Image (cartoon, rainbow, N blue to C red):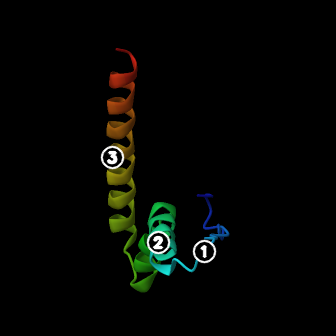
């Protein structure tokens, strides 16, 4: 995501093969979730105080660090 509140929209496309809409919907939902679209929409729904914003950003950064540390720990073996 870009800093400065830039509008970072991606084109999400799902191809439907053999009229299999259920499979296409599962793929679409997974892509949207991985993109974080629902999370961004939820955050925009209500006002977030600056102090809450800082705390949330700090929690997200710590989570990313833990995930990266976990990945690095298993790669070295």
Above or below 31: residue 76: above
Q: Residue at x 60, y 67 (%)?
A: 5
The numbered mark, 2 or 3, whose residue comes first in the sequence reads 2
Rendering coords of residue 2 (x, y %): 63, 58
Label 2 with label 3: CB-CB less than 8 Å:
no
Label 3 with label 1: CB-CB less than 8 Å:
no
Residue 63: mark in rendering: 3
Q: Residue at x 51, y 80 (%)?
A: 21
Q: Mark 3 and mark 1: span between their CA atoms?
A: 35 Å
Above or below 42: residue 32: above
Residue 16: mark in rendering: 1
The numbered mark, 3 or 1, whose residue comes first in the sequence reads 1
Label 1 with label 2: CB-CB less than 8 Å:
no
User: Where is residue 48, by image quadrant?
Assistant: bottom left
Mark 3 residue crowding within 10 angstroms, few (<14) / some (14–19) / many (20+): few
**What secondary structure is found at the residue carrying circle 1?**
loop
Q: Mark 1 and mark 2: span between their CA atoms?
A: 8 Å
**What secondary structure is found at the residue carrying circle 2?**
helix
Residue closer to the observer: 37 or 60: 37
Q: Residue at x 59, y 75 (%)?
A: 18
**What secondary structure is found at the residue carrying circle 3?**
helix
Give the tally of numbered discs. 3
Q: Residue at x 58, y 58 (%)?
A: 1
Residue that badge 2 annotates: 23
């Amino acid at each position: 995501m870009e800093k400065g509140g830039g509008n970072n929209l991606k084109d999400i496309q799902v191809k439907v093969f053999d009229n299999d809409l259920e499979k296409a919907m599962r793929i679409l939902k997974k892509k949207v979730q991985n993109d974080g679209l629902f999370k961004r929409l939820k955050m925009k729904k209500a006002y977030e105080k600056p102090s809450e914003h800082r705390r949330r950003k700090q929690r997200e950064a710590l989570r990313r660090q833990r995930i990266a540390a976990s990945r690095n720990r298993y790669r070295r073996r």
